[in-house]
Image (cartoon, rainbow, N blue to C red):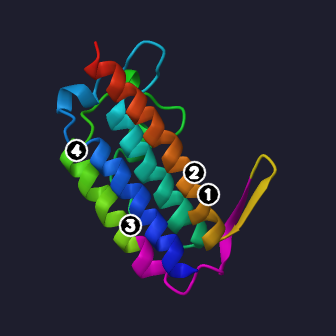
């Protein structure tokens, strides 16, 4: 089971990264009408939430760069940013490296109980595997948002 989950995490992450491969820094900052956030925010948010779900909830030390909580936490938005966020290159590098770190850290540990279980509506996340599996849904949701924003930007 370990390999299957790690393969899925790598696949989903590669889809996310390929989607933004040809996005410019300017395009990454466009917030279309009807949206609160942009492509850059969605990438940073994916990274931040994965650090919390994979590492912090398992009792490991997450790798969260300075400013990420203020820029990319749930409820934040680019309109409130007071400092320049990371570049797309930096975000892509962090996202790529994160998947390798998850596999290295959690190989043969997926059934471990979480140090900080969590309930999301009726879903209880109690093991490393449950958090990582749920993160596939989370990233897929934000990848679809990125896809929608990209389509709006490139067709306007």
Query: At x 36% / y 64%, what residue is drawn?
Result: 98
Q: Mark 3 points at which residue?
A: 99
x then y, percent, for residue 137: 57, 51
x then y, percent, for residue 50: 48, 57
**Over which residues does the magenta segment extend?**
102-119
Residue 110, magenta (yes or no): yes
Q: Name the residue under label 2.
A: 137
- How far apart are the two marked residues, 1 and 2, measured between alpha carbons? 5 Å
- How far apart are the two marked residues, 4 and 3, measured between alpha carbons? 17 Å
x then y, percent, for residue 26: 19, 26
Residue 27, magenta (yes or no): no
- How far apart are the two marked residues, 4 and 1, measured between alpha carbons? 25 Å
- Is residue 10 shown above or below 88? below
Q: Name the residue under label 4.
A: 21
x then y, percent, for residue 112: 65, 81
Q: Name the residue under label 1.
A: 134
Location of residue 86 by image quarter: top left
């Amino acid at each position: 089971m370990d390999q299957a989950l790690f393969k899925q995490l790598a696949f989903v992450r590669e889809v996310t990264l390929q989607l933004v491969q040809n996005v410019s820094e300017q395009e990454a900052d466009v917030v279309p009408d009807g949206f609160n956030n942009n492509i850059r925010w969605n990438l940073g948010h994916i990274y931040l939430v994965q650090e919390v779900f994979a590492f912090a909830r398992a009792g490991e030390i997450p790798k969260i760069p300075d400013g990420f909580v203020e820029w990319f936490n749930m409820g934040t938005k680019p309109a409130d940013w007071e400092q320049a966020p990371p570049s797309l290159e930096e975000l892509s590098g962090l996202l790529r490296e994160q998947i390798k770190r998850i596999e290295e850290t959690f190989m043969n540990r997926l059934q471990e109980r979480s140090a900080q279980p969590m309930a999301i509506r009726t879903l209880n996340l109690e093991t490393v595997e449950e958090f990582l599996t749920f993160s596939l849904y989370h990233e897929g949701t934000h990848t679809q948002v990125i896809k929608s924003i990209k389509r709006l930007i490139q067709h306007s």
